[in-house]
């Protein structure tokens, strides 16, 4: 049995589990359920045996009580591997490991700490130095990892296909509903299923495929954590996903992770670091032959430079993005994870850049193109582009049109659980505050106040004075 050997040993001693693990799980689930006053299935038991620690104290106590009844003696939580809050290093996952096995250990710890709601990680800010150290380590690496799993479970093509399909499912959910919608479910999948695969037995060829898929699943967890506003945790997932990707020898996969880290750094206002991360991605893949990837790397650099107000640098990067995009061949592009980067996505990036450079007319043109017939179909992407269009109209002095478009975006966002969406609304709110009190603005605020993003639920419930929420 893999995972929590302490729990497995006690279950065997109590007669709930045979050596092959084939019987007794449902019986144990019912025994725990009686103690907890709720229903558990054998799937829960498999997760506990796989190493997942139940979050709530009531369930942990029910497990030890069910065992104690069978064994005829008290059972403490530390005896079943639930020994109180684990001490988590503040640096867990921040270091780019020399050995990939250390990276897998760090990832396993991160997944479990995430599920345990360890506040030190959930509230941690991004570490600025870690971006530079990580990108440099990846860029100049000469490491050649040996991948050869020697665990009990044999891993084959069907396991890898299942991992890939599950990641794609969570990716669709993320794009349609935001990172906060199913993030925890993805982390549970990583901690149980993916951790078990990484701890299995496999050849080097199978291992490289497994590591590549695990890296992409962890990259998605990083994106969803970033979208949920968990920036320190997201950064750690990005770093360890990059180390897994390096071990596969796939430079484009690694560069796509640096590209995502650049996106986060721009969002957090670390524009120089963001530009450098995008450049590192480009420099590390100069011979990889993916025009789509290079176009996106240039676009991320342009986004950062636009925020810095570097007009010449941004224009140069945007030109590079357009040049590479025009020479791409999607059918032959090895970077499958850039398949979504179509005309609509490029237009959205150029719209962001021109908005931030103060070119409102160009920004509205590109944002409108992004929302045209080639639109991505992802709800969150449509929201971002629509808010950029609203900002551009506002910057052109078209307040009424800007409010109409912003209201459309707010209605789109009703389906999303995304902290990033709130930042777009805040930027529009700042622009709106400079317009003054007009009939169009008053009408917009009245309608917008019914939406979740404009007036969060906690603000609606806040006690008021004179009809306005207390700040």
Image: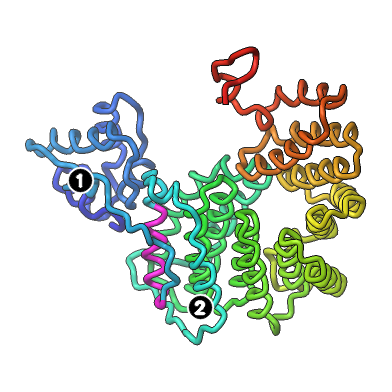
**Which is nearer the eye, 338 or 129?**
129
Considering the image in quadrants, where does the N terminus appear? bottom left
Badge 1 vs badge 2, beta-carbon distance below 8 Å: no
**Which is nearer the eye, 122 or 423?**
423
Label 1 CA crowd tier, 10 Å (few <14, some 14–19, many 20+): many
Query: Magenta segment range?
Result: 98-111
Taking 358 as reference, is 254 above or below it?
below
Residue located at (19% from left, 42% from top): 77
Tag 1 secondary structure: helix
Considering the image in quadrants, where does the C terminus appear? top right
Residue 251 locus on image (x, y percent): 61, 77
Residue located at (64% from left, 45% from top): 420
Residue 17 locus on image (x, y percent): 23, 47
Mark 1 or mark 2: which comes first in sequence?
Answer: 1
Counting every numbered tag in the picture gives 2
Residue located at (82% from left, 72% from top): 316
Residue 253 locus on image (x, y percent): 61, 71
Left or right side of 14 for 147: right
Q: What kind of secondary structure does the magenta stretch mostly adopt?
A: helix
Residue located at (86% from left, 75% from top): 327
In magenta stretch: residue 349 = no
In magenta stretch: residue 101 = yes
Residue 137: which numbered mark, if any? 2
**Which is nearer the eye, 63 or 87?**
87
Left or right side of 271 for 373: right
Question: For the view shown, which residue lies furthest in the left direction?
Answer: 73
Distance CA(mark 1)–CA(mark 2): 45 Å
Residue 328 in view (yes/no): no
* Image quadrant assignment for residue 302: bottom right
Residue 306: which numbered mark, if any? none
Tag 2 secondary structure: helix
Residue marked by disc 1: 11
């Amino acid at each position: 049995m893999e995972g929590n050997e302490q729990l497995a040993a006690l279950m065997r001693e109590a007669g709930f589990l045979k050596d092959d693990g084939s019987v007794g799980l449902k019986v144990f689930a019912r025994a725990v359920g009686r103690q907890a006053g709720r229903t558990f299935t054998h799937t829960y038991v498999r997760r506990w045996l796989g190493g997942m620690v139940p979050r709530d104290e009531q369930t942990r106590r029910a497990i030890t009580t069910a065992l104690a009844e069978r064994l005829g003696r008290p059972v403490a939580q530390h005896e079943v591997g639930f020994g109180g809050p684990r001490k988590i290093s503040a640096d867990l996952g921040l270091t780019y490991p020399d050995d990939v096995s250390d990276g897998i250990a760090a990832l396993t710890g991160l997944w479990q700490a995430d599920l345990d709601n360890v506040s030190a990680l959930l509230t941690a800010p991004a570490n600025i130095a870690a971006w530079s150290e990580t990108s440099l380590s990846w860029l100049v690496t000469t490491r050649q990892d040996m991948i050869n799993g020697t665990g009990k479970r044999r891993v084959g093509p069907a396991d890898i296909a299942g991992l890939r399909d599950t990641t794609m499912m969570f990716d669709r959910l993320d794009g349609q509903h935001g990172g906060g919608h199913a993030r925890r479910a993805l982390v549970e999948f990583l901690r149980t299923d993916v951790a078990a695969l990484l701890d299995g037995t496999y050849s080097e060829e199978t291992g490289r495929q497994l590591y590549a898929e695990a890296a992409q699943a962890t990259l998605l967890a990083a994106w969803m954590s970033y979208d949920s506003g968990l920036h320190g945790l997201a950064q750690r997932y990005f770093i360890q996903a990059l180390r897994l990707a390096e071990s596969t020898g796939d430079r484009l996969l690694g560069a796509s992770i640096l590209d995502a880290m650049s996106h986060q750094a721009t969002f957090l206002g670390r524009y120089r670091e963001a530009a450098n991360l995008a450049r590192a991605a480009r420099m590390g893949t100069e011979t990889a032959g993916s025009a789509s990837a290079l176009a996106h790397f240039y676009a991320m650099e342009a986004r950062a430079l636009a925020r810095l107000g570097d007009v010449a640098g941004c224009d140069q990067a945007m030109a590079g993005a357009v040049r590479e995009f025009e020479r791409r061949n999607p059918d032959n592009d090895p970077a499958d994870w850039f398949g979504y980067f179509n005309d609509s996505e490029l237009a959205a990036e150029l719209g962001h850049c021109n908005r931030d450079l103060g070119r409102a007319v160009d920004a509205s043109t590109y944002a409108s193109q992004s929302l045209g017939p080639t639109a991505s179909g992802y709800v969150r992407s449509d929201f971002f582009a629509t808010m950029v269009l609203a900002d551009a109209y506002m910057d052109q002095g078209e307040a009424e049109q800007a409010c109409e478009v912003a209201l459309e975006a707010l209605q789109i966002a009703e389906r999303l659980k995304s902290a990033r969406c709130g930042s777009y609304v805040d930027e529009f709110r700042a622009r709106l505050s400079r317009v003054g009190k007009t009939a169009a603005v008053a009408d917009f605020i009245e309608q917008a106040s019914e939406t979740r993003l404009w007036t969060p639920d906690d603000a609606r419930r806040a006690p008021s004075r004179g009809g306005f929420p207390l700040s």
